Amino acid sequence: MIPHAAALAALLAASLGAVGPAIAQQRPRAGELPAPAELSVPSLRDMMITTPTPSGVPNAPEEKKAPEPPVDPNADLAYGAFQRGHYIAAMAEARKRVEGRRLDPAAMTLIGKLYADGLGVGRNEAEAARWFERAAALGDREAMFALGLARLQGVGGEKDPKEAADWFAKAGEIGQSEALYNLGVMRLQGENGRPDFKGAAEAFKAASEAGQADAQYAYAALLKEGSGVDKNVEESVLWLGRAAAQDQIAALVEYGIARFNGSGVEKDEADAARLFERAAERGNAIAQNRLARLYAYGRGVGRDPARAAAWHRLARAQGLSDAWLEGFVQTLSEADRAKADELSKRWEARLGPLPAAEAALAGSGSPAPKP
């Protein structure tokens, strides 16, 4: 169950000053079928949305390449080099575009990005902020978004949450959906601990309509509780489904619960199992636990004690214990135990390192910005 909106705001606020994440997890009771997940609140740094950085090695020398076809003179050489990981070349091309008094906000934003991340040049956050400021003044929405992050975190200048919110709002007005999401988070946190649910709902809705998955999940939470917006369970589930379609982990878990119970949407245990499996395969402990119970009961999937035990072991390894499943595992035959061992080892190898606790236990996460 998505937690009460007031709890979302309170736990978010508490997480801002914490060294680690604030996590509360509801443990399933013996014999209980998939139940709503409790709140998991990552820290501000872990949750702030940022633009992705292309893969590549900072300050790496240019690789020798085979001759390439003639270059289109209208092509964006700077961003092309950036996307290929040729950061030194990207900086050189971007600087050509801003020589003298030429005004090229996209090139200015790229220069800021390279300085901010130390790609092809030494990291210099103050210099990055100066370039972002120049580009933002010329209307570049990505620069506005970057400035919002910088002011929120006090990177390259003084920390100024109010200015950060202003930059997020300006970027959102011209279509930067991640900025709208972050603006919603800041409004949910509120000033002096007083959440602005209406303002948060407006920002989350705008970002949701632009297709931003985390905002869709957050907006669903407010719709479910009727906080800042008229309560509408059916619409809440609709937005959960849209976020789940984009593999938003918490939405996969919550929408799976809704499908299993038929809450605000047609009941479909098989679809619920598929949703739990998608989240479980991404390392979510709650989904792994729910899927284990479905295999144990044979609900939505064929009964498979070995798979139930294997998923339970993966969830338990991430800190989610379940007394009922522990007892269930004790009843397995030697053959099923051996199969469970094989499956859990295979899945562990495929999943890689265990995810951070925030991602592993996300199920009804409070919306929060991510740096």
Image (cartoon, rainbow, N blue to C red):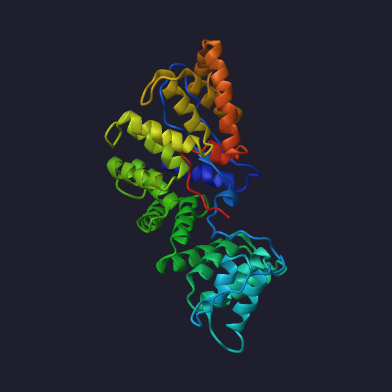
**Picture layout, residue 17 above or below residue 89:** above
Name the foreground residue: 194 vs 243: 243
**Picture layout, residue 1 above or below residue 120:** above
**Picture layout, residue 162 above or below residue 333:** below
Provide residue 204's location: percent of width, then percent of height.
Answer: 40, 54
Provide residue 300's location: percent of width, then percent of height.
Answer: 36, 26
Q: How many marks?
A: 0
Provide residue 99's location: percent of width, then percent of height.
Answer: 61, 86
Q: Quick one: quadrant of the C terminus?
A: bottom right
Residue 320 visible in this rendered orientation of the protein: no
Provide residue 46's location: percent of width, then percent of height.
Answer: 58, 49
**Picture layout, residue 229 above or below residue 263:** below
Position of 143 with respect to 268 (left or right) is right
The residue at the point 42 percent across, 39 percent down is: 252
The residue at the point 68 percent across, 65 percent down is: 118
Name the foreground residue: 166 vs 174: 174
The residue at the point 70 percent across, 66 percent down is: 123
